[in-house]
Image (tube, rainbow, N blue to C red):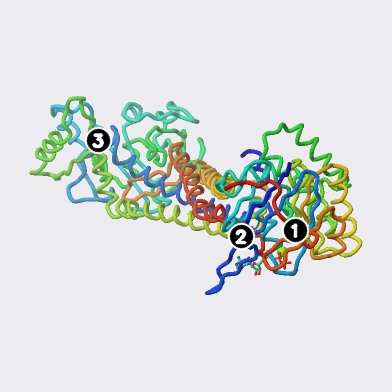
Amino acid sequence: MSLVDVLNVTKEYANGDETIRPLDGVSLSIHEGDYVSLMGASGSGKSTLLNLIAGIDQVASGEIVVAGTDITKLSRGKLADWRAAHIGYVFQTHNLIPVLTAYENVELPLLLLPMSAAERRKRVEIALEAVDLTPRASHYPRQMSGGQEQRVGIARAIVASPTIIVADEPTGSLDDETTEQILSLLSRVNDELGMTLLMVTHDADAGARARRQVRLERGRLMENGKETKATTLRTA
Amino acid sequence: MLKFIPYVLKSLWRHRARTLLTVSGTAIALSVFCFIGSVQQGLLALTSGANAERTLIVFQENRFCPQSSKLPQDYERTIAKMPGVQEVVPIKVFTNNCRASLDAIVFQGMPAEQLKSARQLELASGNWNAFDQQDDAALVGQDIAARRGLAAGDKFTIGDVSVVVRGVFRSPVAAENSLIYTHLDFLQRARGANEVGIVTQLEVHLADTADPDTVSKQIDGAFRAGPVATTTRTKGMFQTDTLGDLAELIGFVHWLGYACVGLVLSLVATTTVMSVQDRIKEHAVLQTLGVRPLRVFRLVLIESLVLSAIGGLLGVLASTAILSTTGMSIAAEGVTIAFEPSLVLATQGLVVAIAVGILAGLVPGWQASRTEIVPALRHA
Ligand SMILES: Nc1ncnc2c1ncn2[C@@H]1O[C@H](COP(=O)(O)OP(=O)(O)OP(=O)(O)O)[C@@H](O)[C@H]1O
Ligand SMILES: [Mg+2]
């Protein structure tokens, strides 16, 4: 059974008189434990698709069903609750909260879930351990390197055990060595923790580390030279 | 929501210069607000309440400054016989400054027995015996004692009048705490021999059933033909008339109190708007993590509330401390308005600060909660 079904999704932007349509009826299924890389030219709509799946942008038409919920139908408030429970988002620039320590940044998503303080503590410690930053727990973002900040960002994304982790060019602003660190960390998150990942990248090498590679080309989504389809067929 | 309080406080602390400036600005405005309120209360206390409405003051007709009102002391006997009159207290008033002043000294000379019965003075130091036994003894109100640093045993001279402090008292009537009481005949003699037998005013205490207006008319009627014509009013009206322009000015000053509230509102709102604009991206990140728009709104509201409430608390504490230690007052023509701190005023100040904090956070909070996530994430 698939975890995420993108069904015939279109996204448009009005740009003066003309309409830009970065996504033109795309469909995609992501299964539990998948590691999908999403590639394509700059401006092809990668971030747009990722943001739709993450529930922070709205479709023009189509459905996005995650773990049985059509998120295009949710209100703003409900969608926020849904994100807290189901999405781990890794940004290109880590986007940590500057006034909070590494520990507090990782803890933040858990504050939104019904959970005891002891349970929170345990989870934050496990997540920091997973990204190998336990000794840095009390450091502020400004006291860490770019790679360390990104690892805190990954810890924050995995801490609540979300349904899917989405990452938009997570290595886009890192040097080669740090990129390698982050990519192998993401592979471990998929391999060892069994988490489902969707990663946008325009680095072919990075994309090749994923189990599945899909490309956006002129509004269409391609996998292995064929247009992707949703495996769960729903009649609307 | 409590789980997010550390985040709010840390965000405020991150811009501590801005936060401290806003808090101190709020504190100053709120202390001015309380100050103005205390002056208003002081004025109100003079003109309302049983003491102001059930006591009559007989003064020389068409005179305002106590120096120029000269009534024969034996009017006392005539008035005492009138129906509805319970007691008549002859009072000699001396002040060093008839114009509006923050540091006027007002003496009231009264027969010692009547001082004891007609005023509810509670001696904080000194004793009545020492006062009774000495011609030039004085009892000093606690506010003026604080202002002038006076204690029992001190000698105190103003102009021609020189007294020895024999006690410091507290009175339930705020304005009396700024007075100095002496023996009547002492104050009459202290200012030249021909003042003996002359008083500034007569204070008439009414029986419970007496109508103040009727008795006033009766008194003025009795002396219309002289030797000195009188004007009799309730103590409240007398004080309002005497303060005249000053009372009107003080009444007008309450607008400045509203201006203070407006000032705090714009100050806190400006800071909150700036803080929201600084963090457009941060709020988008919070929303991406799953923070509801309504919670973002509340976070901003709490931030502005904390600013305003801390500033308000400091302002209220500061003004209360100043008002209660300095015993400030303003006097004109021998009538004193005491600036009294009060629980009501402090509560009012805090409520205003809290309301303003919430009000100031509404618009920025709403803006923050309406932020579109994706464009805001692209924000620098
Ligand atoms: N708010 C917007 N208004 C108008 N056009 C937009 C808006 N957001 C995105 N677009 C357009 O939609 C298209 C897809 O944008 P998107 O950011 O998804 O591309 P991308 O594949 O992530 O590119 P990159 O690799 O540069 O990040 C682009 O042509 C972009 O100009
Ligand atoms: Mg992009």
Amino acid at dot 2: Thr
Which of the numbered marks, if any, corresponds to residue A210?
Answer: none
| Location of mark 3 (residue) | B53
* SS class, disc 1: strand
**What percent of the width, then of the height, locates residue B368?**
57, 54
| Location of mark 2 (residue) | A10
Residue lying furthest left: B225
**What percent of the width, then of the height, locates residue B329?**
42, 47
| Same chain for the residues under marks 2 and 3 in the image | no
N-term mark: 1 or 2:
2
Instruction: Examine the rendering and report whether any part of residue B311 can be seen.
Output: no
The crowding category of the residue bearing disc 3, from other C-alpha atoms within 10 Å (few below 14, some 14 to 19, many at least 20), is some
* SS class, disc 3: helix
* SS class, disc 2: strand
Numbered disc total: 3
Which of the numbered marks, if any, corresponds to residue A168?
Answer: 1
Q: Nearer the viewer, residue B331 or A176?
A: A176
| Same chain for the residues under marks 1 and 3 in the image | no
Q: Nearer the viewer, residue B208 or A235?
A: A235
